[in-house]
Image: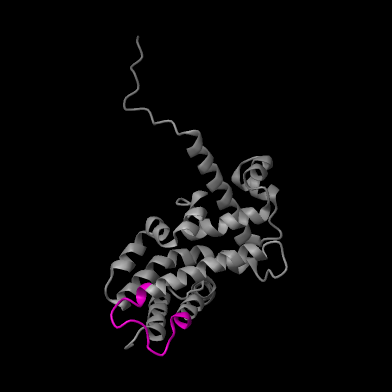
Amino acid sequence: MKKKPPSGKAAPRRSRQDRALETRRRMLRAAYELVCEQGYEPTTMAAIAVRAGVAVQTLYFTFRSKPAILSEVLHATVAGFDQWSPTLDRDVHADHRATAREVMPWFRAFEEEADPYRALELYVEGTAEIFARVGPLLANLGPQRGTEIEATLAASEALRAEASTMIVATLATKGAGLRPTLTRRQASDLFFVLTSAELYHALVAGRGWPPARANRWLTDLLAHQLLAGR
């Protein structure tokens, strides 16, 4: 009896580049999980390799060092592990706004919304998932002054400050704009401090607030502090 050919089409073979990206993301996710569970110092390259299911030599070949892994973990945690690619870091530095539009679907809606309060709602709703990922990571990193990852964390905060300036510049074009008593720099500083992942994490994970309540509180706070006529 002749065997019947298998029904349906065979799944397309993934390219070597696709497989390498999938492995890289798996290693980043493993590092993220371990740092969230036990902190940075106890997390070893060997432990990351075991969690990711790769040889430790593969980990070193890909990232070279543990601080380099953390740098990519921080960016992948913001973008989302399924969205992350090694080119995103370069893209953000080249054009932060264009990269945000591409990687974060809610960002374009934030830009296009004419009402400043609703725009803030869209921002908070969109970034709540980012806060949920980044908060546990930062909470388990703790103070890192003088350590091998101090520069990595400072670079990440510099990007967040740049994003805050970009968001505030967009808010200034909506409705009545920003409060007249604020300079643009002051408004950006307030936005930077109030939208820290640690603050959101402290409310939701630390104090047990439902995300919907935390989102409403943060939206109201930002509107009251930043927007004219609030």
Please provide percent x and percent y for residue 42: 71, 58
Q: How is the image coloured?
A: one colour
- The quarter of the picture where the N terminus appears is top left
Q: Quadrant of residue 3?
A: top left
Please provide percent x and percent y for residue 62: 62, 44
- The quarter of the picture where the C terminus appears is bottom left
Q: Is residue 87 left or right of residue 217?
A: right
Q: From this viewpoint, is residue 33 visible?
A: no
Asked whether 177 falls inside the magenta stretch, the response is yes
The residue depicted at 52 percent of the width and 55 percent of the height is 89
Asked whether 153 falls inside the magenta stretch, the response is no
Please tell me whether residue 5 is drawn above or below residue 60 in the rendered image: above
The residue depicted at 60 percent of the width and 46 percent of the height is 52
Nearest the viewer among 227 and 4 is 227
Boundaries of the magenta span: 170-187
The residue depicted at 37 percent of the width and 28 percent of the height is 10
Nearest the viewer among 210 and 92 is 92
Residue extending farthest bottom: 181
Residue extending farthest top: 1
Which secondary structure class fits the magenta region best? loop
Please provide percent x and percent y for residue 144: 68, 68
Please tell me whether residue 202 is drawn above or below residue 52 in the rendered image: below
The residue depicted at 42 percent of the width and 67 percent of the height is 127
Residue extending farthest right: 146
Please tell me whether residue 33 is drawn above or below residue 113 in the rendered image: above
Q: Is residue 182 left or right of residue 147?
A: left
Q: From this viewpoint, is residue 199 visible?
A: yes
